[in-house]
Amino acid sequence: MRKSTKSLLGSVCALCLALASVANAQQFELVINNGRVMDPESGLDGIRHLGINAGRIISVSDSPLSGTREINANGLVVAPGFVDIHAHGQTEEAYRLMVQDGVTSGFELEIGTAHVGEWYAERAGGQVLNYGISIGHIPVRMVLFDDPGRFLPMAAGGSGIAGPEIMDRMAAMMRQGIAEGAVAVGFGLAYTPAATESEFAAMLEIATAAGATAHIHTRGGLTGLQQIIDSARAARTPLHIVHANSSGGASIDEFLGIIQAARDSGQDVTTEMYPYAASYSDIASALFDDWQDWEEDRFQRNMWVATGERLTRESFGRYRLVGGGVITFSRTEEQTRSALQHPLTMVASDGRILDGKGHPRSSGTYAKVLGQYVREEQLIDLMDALRRMTIEPARRLEAFVPALRNKGRIRVGADADITIFDLSTIRDRATYTDPILPSQGIEYVLVNGAVVLDGGELNPEIRAGVAIRSN
């Protein structure tokens, strides 16, 4: 009996070795050999070899693999592709810059759109990365109030009071957007000062009924943040607070403390930051309604994006009549560091590029975190930085968006969205005056198994990115 058992065990072991040998000998469409594979979901950090077929990771091996195409990642970090859950720049121009910054999936979830189906139809046929949109409270309001703003409200879309008829139409549009596949519900309460607490609560109920996350730009400082958290708790809505560093400003520690307290009490609330001290918005928006009361030196803190000029009272008023992008230098580097060091914050760009103009965060957010704050300053470690860029944003969306369950990870069966970079050289290059300089040190980016960035060179003809919807 013992001899028989030994013989059986020997046969099983031999079979295991044979199967491992077959797996290693398998010919893959693409292999990534010799890289330092880092997966924040499992904690893996070691030299591994990846085999990819049909857009999926098929093998994570201790031994080199063979494939039709081989990428030798010796000396490079092989990470899940970055998931940007706050990217306004949903154009081909912006997508290309995002890929060069390591992003493989980009979502516009704060502002969103009023017409989800049309938005996806405009991008049908593939893009250089994966993309998705929220149904947005702001653009719905802009439609219902016939607001002339191009991106944010300039008139009644922000200042109009919604009566019963408008509220009914608003609710119908929000539900329609969810039915058309919106991946979240977006709010920018700072841009819609006339939206009442009851209006906000009614829209949160729609998100809760669908199981969608509410992504919210807060208003009213710390008090306003607490009110939003309380409203979401009452409605049982999963809540994501956008750009904590921008909304928190000089009170960033207290701002994050309020969110932490809500989480400690069991509430589903998350947040994000971008690694820049200047913000970017539309000069005609409600954020600047008090501009006539400013002290003179405050105007100089604002840069008109179209020309790069610093503004005066006269030029600020003139440009406000027509609307357009303005960059505001309002925070300190210490505030940025505080936001990034807090374990709660994900990394998201809040980017928007239009005709070569915008904010450098659109092009450089991820490389800046990895180059400046990880390599140079050692403010956070590499695995923690990757966690904030990959698995955490994927987890934020995956309960409502099943496609995200296979993104932000390197494991067998996951989508082959992969970013490969040189930690010794990665850095952002975009500036406030030249925001479309691509990042350096990112060598390869795979989107659904296709090599979109190859040896540091973007191939815009490879359009393997797909629409990500909630249904």
Image: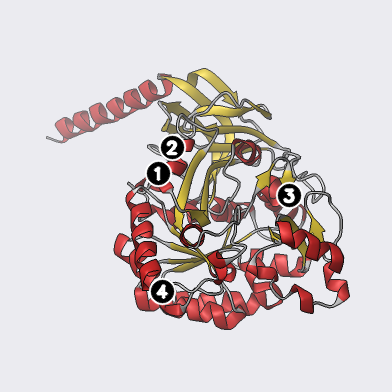
Q: Can residue 468 be seen in this view?
A: no
Q: Earlier in the sequence, mark 4 or mark 1?
A: 1
Q: Residues within 10 Å of mark 1 (few under 14, many from 20)?
A: some
| 249, above or below 176, in the image | below
Percent x, y of residue 261:
50, 79
Q: What element carries label 4?
A: loop
| 15, above or below 366, in the image | above
* Residue located beneath label 4 in the image: 163
Give the CA distance from mark 2 to mark 3: 28 Å
Give the CA distance from mark 4 to mark 2: 32 Å
Q: Residue 121 carries which label?
A: 2
Give the CA distance from mark 1 to mark 3: 30 Å
* Residue located beneath label 3 in the image: 360
Query: Mark 4 or 2, which is nearer the eye?
Result: 4
* Residue located beneath label 1 in the image: 117
Nearer to the camera, 290 or 448: 290
Q: Which of marks 1 and 3 is nearer the N terminus?
A: 1
Residues at marks 2 and 1 touching, judged by CB atoms closer than 8 Å: yes
Q: Which amino acid does label 4 sit on?
A: Gly
Residues at marks 4 and 1 touching, judged by CB atoms closer than 8 Å: no
Q: Is mark 3 on a helix, strand or loop?
A: loop
Give the CA distance from mark 4 to mark 3: 40 Å
Percent x, y of residue 332:
78, 68
Nearer to the camera, 453 or 423: 453
Residue lying at 64% horizontally and 69% vertically, measured from the top left: 286
Q: Earlier in the sequence, mark 4 or mark 3?
A: 4
Residue lying at 37% horizontally and 50% vertically, measured from the top left: 401
In this rendering, the count of numbered labels is: 4
In the image, taking residue 327 as reference, residue 184 lies left or right, namely left
Give the CA distance from mark 4 to mark 1: 27 Å
Q: Which amino acid does label 2 sit on?
A: Ala
Q: Earlier in the sequence, mark 4 or mark 2?
A: 2
